[in-house]
Image: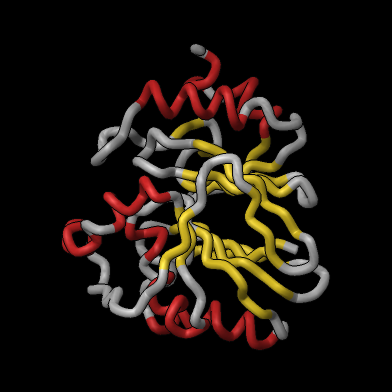
């Protein structure tokens, strides 16, 4: 089961993915205020869920501003690709530039995931990690075969792709990774983006202008 929240002034999609044993992972916790964080915590409490992973698709602060507090609250690490640390570590500049609250990362643990590895949680639930770097270093997508869905962060949007004019962005790299690693998934795979509505591989292969030109 997938539960979606929309948080903060950048309207980030935060996802909770749970298995049949009520274990769950939280993807891109964008909850920036106490009220938003309470929405996540209350949902988890009310549904008797046990968070096992905090999965980050990429290290822009609008996607991880809530992860620091949740990592401390649930005593679990933040999981991300190692290349993302160079972006994560400038979180103070990101907070100032994007109007987010200050973060205290003291005592927060990190777990690093290489591309192509499986993330496991619950009772044999597997998420395959996919290289979608290009929006920023270390961008990683999580593909759930069980749900026919892929969590892509800001790599792909409905009829669009992520911007590449920020620190570490690379347009050619992003388009190459989308075409090689996302558009090769089954056509009925639902694309769950970091902002905006869901789409799917079949629709984007036909209608996304950034993909059509390659």
- Residue 98 seen in render: no
Q: Is residue 159 left or right of residue 68?
A: right
Give the colouring mode of the picture: secondary structure
**Which residue is depicted at the point 36% across and 67% down?**
65
Where residue 99 appears, as percent x and y from the top left, is 22, 64
Instruction: State whether residue 43 is above or below residue 135.
Output: below
Q: Residue at x 56, y 23 (%)?
A: 179
- Dividing the image into 4 quarters, which one contains the N terminus? bottom right
Q: Residue at x 47, y 85 (%)?
A: 73
Return the x and y of residue 119 as percentages of the image width and height.
63, 55
> Residue 150, relative to residue 29: is it above or below?
above
Q: Is residue 206 left or right of residue 162?
A: right
Residue at (46%, 24%) from the top-left corner? 175
Could you say which is closer to the camera, residue 118 or residue 54? Answer: 118
Question: Is residue 137 visible to the viewer in this orientation of the structure?
Answer: yes
Q: Residue furthest right?
A: 20
Residue 63 position within the rendered picture, expressed as x and y whole percent measured from the top left: 41, 59
Residue 158: quadrant of the picture: top right
| Residue 3 image-quadrant placement | bottom right
Most foreground residue, 190 or 159: 190
Quadrant housing residue 89: bottom left
The vertical placement of 49 against 182, above or below, is below
Image label count: 0
Residue 10: horizontal and vertical position, in percent?
37, 57
């Amino acid at each position: 089961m997938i539960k979606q929240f929309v948080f903060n002034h950048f309207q980030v999609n935060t996802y909770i993915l749970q298995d049949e044993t009520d274990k769950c992972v939280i993807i891109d916790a964008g909850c920036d205020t106490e009220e938003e964080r309470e929405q996540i915590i209350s949902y988890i409490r009310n549904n008797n869920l046990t968070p096992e992973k905090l999965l980050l698709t990429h290290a822009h602060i609008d996607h991880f501003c809530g992860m620091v507090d949740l990592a401390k609250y649930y005593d679990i690490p933040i999981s991300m690709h190692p290349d993302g640390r160079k972006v994560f570590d400038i979180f103070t500049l990101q907070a100032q530039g994007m109007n987010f609250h200050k973060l205290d990362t003291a005592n927060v643990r990190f777990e690093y995931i290489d591309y192509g590895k499986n993330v496991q949680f619950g009772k044999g639930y597997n998420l395959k990690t996919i290289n979608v770097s290009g929006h920023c270093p270390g961008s990683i997508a999580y593909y759930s075969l069980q749900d026919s869905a892929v969590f892509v962060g800001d790599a792909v949007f409905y009829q669009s792709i992520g911007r590449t004019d920020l620190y570490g962005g690379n347009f050619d790299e992003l388009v190459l990774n989308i075409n090689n690693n996302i558009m090769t998934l089954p056509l009925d795979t639902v694309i769950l983006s970091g902002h905006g509505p869901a789409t799917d591989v079949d629709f984007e292969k036909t209608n996304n202008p950034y993909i059509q030109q390659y």
